[in-house]
Amino acid sequence: MTAFTAAFAELSPHERYKLLCASVVPRPIALVTCVSPEGVVNAAPFSFFNVFSEDPALIVLGLQHRPGNRPKDTTRHIAAAGAFVVNMVDEALVEAMNVTAIDFPPEISEIDAAGLSLLPGLDVPVPRIAQAPFALECRRTVSMAFSATRELLVGEVLRIHARAGLVDHSNLRVSMSDYRPVGRLFGDGYSRQNERFDLRRDSYADWAAKNGSPTKNA
Ligand SMILES: Cc1cc2nc3c(=O)[nH]c(=O)nc-3n(C[C@H](O)[C@H](O)[C@H](O)COP(=O)(O)O)c2cc1C
């Protein structure tokens, strides 16, 4: 295969999706819980997701509408209730996560269908998934509609929960070998994070001592 380049203006949305989803990898998976106006707990995974900042503590979610511009249940419920929980996905939770992605009718709780259980939220009136390694209780900050079918939701994290054994209380370090997070690649592809490595960052002085003084680009 030779080198490839393409102007996005000349690609169809589907082609852009293929290239973006396969190149920006692995993406973390937010298994989002929220509550319908009727009180049914909804759960669905989102990998157009990341943490954005820590002060304020913000996360972002890319919410895509269904065909016919119908917002997903998650989009509608968060807009109405203003609160949700991001449950992180690890190896133990990934199969249940996949069940929650099925397009169930709104009156069916994905939680029951996936065999998951819930614990109450402390700062938001939304339960979290008991099996999740981490859960972030969030308040909706703002959502921006970029087209009739795409919304970017920003949420502020009010509280974090971690399963026992994951966070060292004395220094807040997370045990990656116990966490075992799963990343989304594209299509049905996922990745485990089991080949980690450390890369120490030099100070400029250390770098210059090893490499000599750099010359400026002309
Ligand atoms: C791993 C994974 C990641 C997903 N990421 C997204 C996403 O970022 N945005 C989106 O709109 N849908 C995403 N989906 C699809 C939704 O989870 C799916 O449409 C779900 O049925 C929505 O449920 P809801 O109607 O209860 O909100 C993803 C599905 C999977 C399996």
Image (cartoon, grey):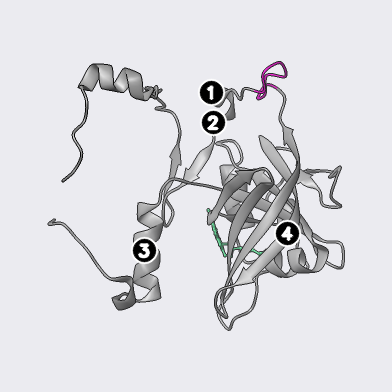
Local crowd at mark 3 within 10 Å, few (<14), some, or many (≥20)?
A: few
The residue singled out by tag 4 in the image is: 141
The Cα–Cα distance between marks 2 and 1, rounded to whole angstroms, is 6 Å
Q: Earlier in the sequence, mark 1 or mark 4?
A: 4
Task: Return the residue at label 1.
Answer: 177
Residue with the most extreme left position:
2
Which comes sooner in the sequence, label 3 or label 2? 3
Residue that label 3 marks? 18
Whether 120 is drawn above or below 175: the answer is: below
- Badges 2 and 1: C-beta atoms under 8 Å apart? yes
| Foreground disc of the pair 1, 4 | 4
Disc 3 to disc 2, how far (Cα)?
26 Å
Q: Main secondary structure of the magenta part?
A: loop
Q: Identify which residue is drawn at 79% across, 61% down.
A: 82
Side of 159 relative to 2 (left or right) = right
Residue 70 x, y percent position in the rendering: 63, 79
Marks 1 and 4: CB-CB under 8 Å? no
Quadrant of the frame with the N terminus: bottom left
Going by the numbered disc 2, the residue's amino acid type is Arg
Q: Earlier in the sequence, mark 4 or mark 3?
A: 3
Of badges 4 and 2, the one in the foreground is: 4
Q: Which residue is mark 2?
A: 180
Q: Residues within 10 Å of mark 2 (few under 14, many from 20)?
A: some
